[in-house]
Image (cartoon, rainbow, N blue to C red):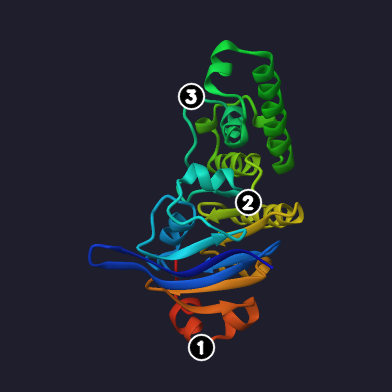
Amino acid sequence: MSILEVKNISKRFGGLQAVKDVSFSVERGAIKAVIGPNGAGKTTLFNLLSGFLPPDSGSVVYQDRPIQGKRPDEIAHRGLSRTFQHIRLFARMTALENVMVGCHVRSRAGFLAGMLNLPATQREDLAIRDRALEMMAFIGIEGLAQSEATSLSYGQQRSVELARALASGPAILLLDEPAAGLNMRETADVAKLISKVRDLGITVLIVEHDMQLVMDISDEIVVLSYGEKIADGVPRAVQSDPEVVRVYLGEDDA
């Protein structure tokens, strides 16, 4: 059963057709990858799915409900969370505080309750802190909780961002270049972590340049070329597709 269906989605920036008539589905509980060289439209596609850009045409159906045109916070509240190719952590906040921000997507206490520091708000704040620490422990970074987030190493910052996305309680997680800038050991750790996330029952859609990582963990792969889909299937079929081999796997996408 599909958790996400992308139907004929398109986006143009002036004379550039960034995404053109792209359709695919993501099965519940799967790890699906979107691959292609720089400029193929991968990050634009993620921005369309997560509400950071409105599509020019087409639809995005998440858990049987259309979400195209919704605000990013509305989409996140419905259970679709994402990370970014370029890390976006809050400066002058600890790693724990950054992860707690993800929990607030589902907080219930209103502005007035927060201002008055009512008992219900205090209880919710404690629950949010516990949830954030739980996600940090799941990833293995609970020891960094009180460190200033932006002072951490690049790989640690990526882990904090992932913990923040998980803290929102997503049903599907969009990962934009999670292994970018990481060494081989860190990339192997990311692969294991993504599989652990799937084991929690969370569906994963990933954009990634590291072909070894993609082939190792993906159930299915979508291939984009100049904003258009040229292949969609299991890794073995995609890997042997002549057009994919010619356009992508035979080129250096770094």
Task: Give SS at disc 2.
Answer: helix
Q: Are marks 1 and 2 in contact (CB under 8 Å)?
A: no
Q: Quadrant of residue 38?
A: bottom left
Q: Extreme bottom residue here? A: 242
- Please, what secondary structure does the residue beneath circle 1 have? helix
* Residue indicated by mark 3: 92
Image check: 238 left or right of 91? Answer: right
Quadrant of residue 220 within the rendered picture: bottom right
Q: Are marks 2 and 3 in contact (CB under 8 Å)?
A: no
Q: Are marks 3 and 1 in contact (CB under 8 Å)?
A: no
* Residue drawn at the location 51% of the way across and 64% of the way down: 209
Disc tally is 3
Q: Is residue 249 above or below residue 16?
A: below
Q: Split into 4 quadrants, where in the image is the N terminus? A: bottom right
Q: Nearer the viewer, residue 110 or 210?
A: 110
| Spot occupied by residue 17 in the image (x, y as percentages of width and height) | 31, 69
Q: Residues within 10 Å of mark 1 (few under 14, many from 20)?
A: few
- Residue linked to disc 1: 242
Can the viewer see residue 228 in this picture?
A: yes
Image x and y of residue 120, in percent: 68, 19
Whole-percent x, y for residue 3 in the image: 64, 62
Which amino acid is tagged 1?
Pro
Say whether residue 213 is visible. Answer: no
Q: For the residues marked 1 and 2, what is the alpha-carbon distance in whole angstroms?
A: 31 Å
Marks 2, 3: nearer the viewer: 3
Between discs 3 and 1, the one toward the N terminus: 3
Viewer-side residue, 31 vs 182 = 31
Q: Disc 2 and disc 3: Cα gap in Å?
A: 26 Å
Q: Compute the Cα span from label 3 to label 1.
A: 50 Å
Residue at the disc numbered 2: 186
